[in-house]
Amino acid sequence: MKKQQIQDSFQIAKVRYAELGINVDEVLNLLDKLSISLHCWQADDVSGFEEGDGELTGGIQATGNYPGRARTISELKADLERAMSLIPGTHRVNLHAFYGDFQGKKVDRNEIEPKHFQSWIDWAKTNNYKLDFNCTCFSHEKSADGQTLSHRDPAIREFWIEHVIRCRKISEEIGRQLGSTCMHNIWVPDGSKDNTVDRFLYRKNLKESLDKIFEYETNDEYMLDCLESKLFGIGLEAFTVGSHEFYMGYGVANNKVVTLDAGHFHPTEVISDKISSLLLYAKEIMLHVSRGVRWDSDHVVLLTDEIQAIMQEIVRADALDRVHIGLDYFDASINRIGAYVVGVRATQKALLQALLEPLSQLREYEANGQNFERMALLEEAKAMPWSAVYDYYCLDKGVPVGDNFIEVIQQYEKEVTLKR
Ligand code: RNT
Ligand code: ZN
């Protein structure tokens, strides 16, 4: 598409949206301020950079062996920079504790310190990214039997408590240095393959471990703790200690952020409809935007009905400042940078569509019981020229418009990732 065409289409779109009472320029200004947190683990299939050949455990799996996986911190940084260069706006990078800069030394999880993440912080500063963080309670010998913070053995629980407290301190340091609240996400794989008798015991253990973890008080301005539930893991099908009810209860009772991962519920259960309820009770919401496909909770995000519904719910609830949008998927079967770019752009498109909704008119119809009118306008809104607005946004921010990013990724593959 030529520059002129993009601009002309945008002008036409603007007029059409203005007829519905929407100021497209204001919407674009707002969209540009909304950061999406890119999960670092798509680039290397959730491998991390610890010494030794850590196997991915914890009931998650990256399937596929597409060439070009990032094997070092510098490769991962380069891949993220390349992905970021193909996405309009300024965004965040979501790190996991086992991606520390350990300089070839064996640093166990209960020994990590802010200094192991200083090079990431410096990199983020240079590139104008903000950082989020996760404790890593999997892919470790002390999580081999599927239990961490809920383990029957108090020594193992202590080990993981220490790890999570250290991660909270690291997150605090990240937020302090970057001047942006670091979202620290706690997800543990704890569960079991088969029917468990002492469910109450494990849940009580998890609760008590969390209580100990939060005894160390952090500064909300620098970091916020988020708690992520799950339905089941691979090899951990019958029981998950940290279920939705568990963390919703804990989060509400203890003023913590609740994380909703789009792939962590029953196949027909959606997170979009949980947002307006949680907002009434939870401090804030962290999203792990993902796409569940059958048993896998981590396919690349696409512009599906559910992602549109998620973004609509955030906008309709006027909660853009209380819902944090992060991505969480790992596909090792396709070009990994492409997986980032497609996923982030799909998320942004859904956000844009939601921001362009003729909300006041829709609300008025609803309030008046004009349900046909509401339905008709919702249908029309789907076909409004939002893509012309997105194309213009890309042009304006100097990133490839439409499918033009494909060739950039192909080139990077040829010159960089295929040579790994
Ligand atoms: C796992 C959770 C968790 C992980 C990351 C790697 O099911 O979704 O968020 O994907 O921590
Ligand atoms: Zn997740």
Image (tube, rainbow, N blue to C red):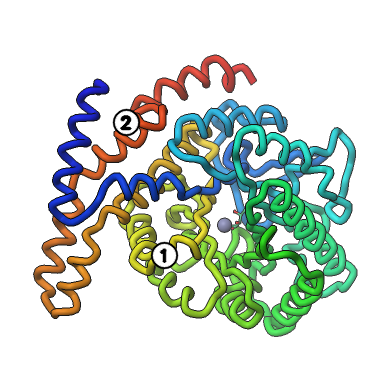
Q: Which residue is mark 1?
A: 267
Q: Residue at x 38, y 44 (%)?
A: 346
Q: Is residue 75 left or right of residue 36?
A: right
Q: Is residue 117 above or below residue 419?
A: below
Residue in front for this viewpoint, 146 or 118: 118
For this view, does 356 lie left or right of residue 301? left
Residue where numbered disc 2 is placed: 402
Residue 300, x across and y down, in percent? 45, 45
Please give the name of the residue rendered at 34% of the width and 36% of the height, measured from the top-left corner: 393
Residue 213 position, x and y percent, is 79, 70
Locate residue 275: give its quadrant. bottom left
Residue 261: horizontal and vertical position, in percent? 51, 61
Earlier sequence position, callout 2 versus callout 1? 1
Q: Residue 116: give x, y in percent of width and height.
A: 82, 43
Q: Quadrant of residue 342?
A: top left
Q: Residues within 10 Å of mark 2 (few under 14, many from 20)?
A: some
Q: For ligand 1, which image quadrant applies?
A: bottom right
